[in-house]
Image (cartoon, rainbow, N blue to C red):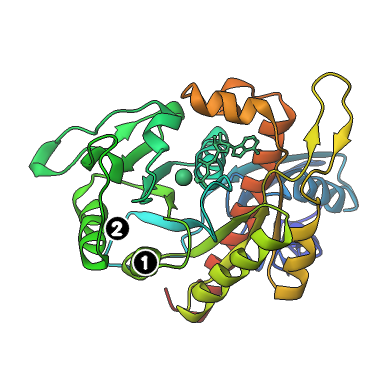
Amino acid sequence: MPTKEEVVQTLKNVVDPELGIDVVSLGMVKGVSVEGDAVEVTLELTTPACPFRAQLKEHVEKALKTLPGVSAVKVNVVARVMPSRVREKILPGVKNIIAIASGKGGVGKSTVTVNVGLALTELGASVGILDADIYGPTIPRILNVKVGLVGADDKIAPAISYNGVKVMSIGFLLQEDEPVIWRGPLVANAIKQFLTEVEWGELDYLIVDLPPGTGDASLTLAQSIPLTGVVIVSTPQDAALKIATKALNMFRKLNVDIIGIIENMSYFVCPNCGHVSEIFGRGGVKVACEKLGTRFLGEIPLSPDIRVNGELGKPVVIAAPESESAGAFRKVAYAIAGSVSVIAYKRGKNGRG
Ligand SMILES: Nc1ncnc2c1ncn2[C@@H]1O[C@H](COP(=O)(O)OP(=O)(O)O)[C@@H](O)[C@H]1O
Ligand SMILES: [Mg+2]
């Protein structure tokens, strides 16, 4: 029968693929117990949406089974989201703030924001969505929510959507069809209010739908929100990629960490015959990511269920959870969560944040 120390020693051979560090050093091994020939271990992941969840569990199980005298192994997997934001004055209860940006409008930024947010909630993460796109605040429509109410202490209560997602939108302040020209400082003020006067509570992830492009508004916003990092959405065409790259370089100049790039409308699967058409040249974003030295976060198909459900106020992850589209969003969400864990780990190690 092995000792607890021997169990821990063995688990030092299991390495987190994302960080390249063993699970013991990462503090992921909790509650080790040995009784007779049975070993039980709890593995605490840094996010419930860990892309290597199954793989890590399997590797821990395998490692434990190599111990002499052990015939029964039980691995419990739990998760606690690691904060990339520590000792922050603004929104101290929010562990990570992820901005979703794009070079231009219409590439699916809001669609990604919502479906990724919902995919993260499925595994138990608490998520807020802040719609900061002053040019086209479409989140309330996609999530079928109306204005948040004034809550206690004059704080603004966010609207609550599917799976308890908290939603605040700049659209709640605007009249529909009202053309509003927001100057930089005005935008920053409104957003500051959203950050300080909305009851976000404790959140694992706050996802911010930024305005498209590299104009004044995006710039001001990116600087007024204390971000963990930014995700860029692009379609695969060369022209789209060029302006996505421009956006990426802007964020780099602002010292915002780049979480990675998503390829949306990557390919089309014919709903009748299943034939795959790579309309816009699938794979362009992946190649660009290699050149840019940034992470490719995955591809989302061009699919009618994504558009239709968005228009019906029920995103595809909720409306058709078994669909290929929902699966694609989930994969992307896990890649983002993994990437954010890496940023959080590095910040924790460097003592900044
Ligand atoms: N992968 C996709 N497949 C089909 N339609 C999509 C996809 N992504 C986005 N759309 C649709 O394209 C339009 C623009 O998407 P949206 O998320 O509003 O873009 P953005 O926020 O970048 O302006 C919407 O009608 C949306 O439903
Ligand atoms: Mg949008």
The response on whether ligand 2 sits within 8 Å of label 1 is no
Tell me, yes or no, if residue 42 can be seen here.
no
Residue at position x 65%, y 39% in the image: 330
Ligand 1 lies in quarter: top right
Residue at position x 62%, y 46% in the image: 333
Instruction: Pick the residue in front: 303 or 143.
Output: 303
Residue 260 sits above or below residue 303 on the image: below
- Which residue is tagged 1? 226
Q: Is residue 315 left or right of residue 305?
A: left
Q: Tag 1: residue type?
A: Pro
In the rendered image, residue 134, in percent from the top left (x then y), is placed at 33, 51
Report which quarter residue 258 is drawn in: bottom right
Report which quarter residue 259 is drawn in: bottom right
Asked if the residue under mark 2 is in contact with the one under mark 1, i.e. CB atoms within 8 Å, the reply is yes
Residue at position x 39%, y 69% in the image: 219
Specify the quadrant that holds the C terminus. Answer: bottom left
Q: Tag 2: residue type?
A: Leu
Q: Quick one: SS at disc 1?
A: loop
In the rendered image, residue 192, in percent from the top left (x then y), is placed at 23, 60
Q: Residues within 10 Å of mark 1 (few under 14, many from 20)?
A: many
- Which residue is tagged 2? 91
Numbered circle sitting on residue 245: none
Q: How many marks?
A: 2
Which circle's residue, 1 or 2, is located before the other in the chain? 2
Report which quarter residue 127 is drawn in: top left
Residue 65 sits above or below residue 186 on the image: above
Q: Quick one: SS at disc 2?
A: loop
Instruction: Pick the residue in front: 72 or 27.
Output: 27
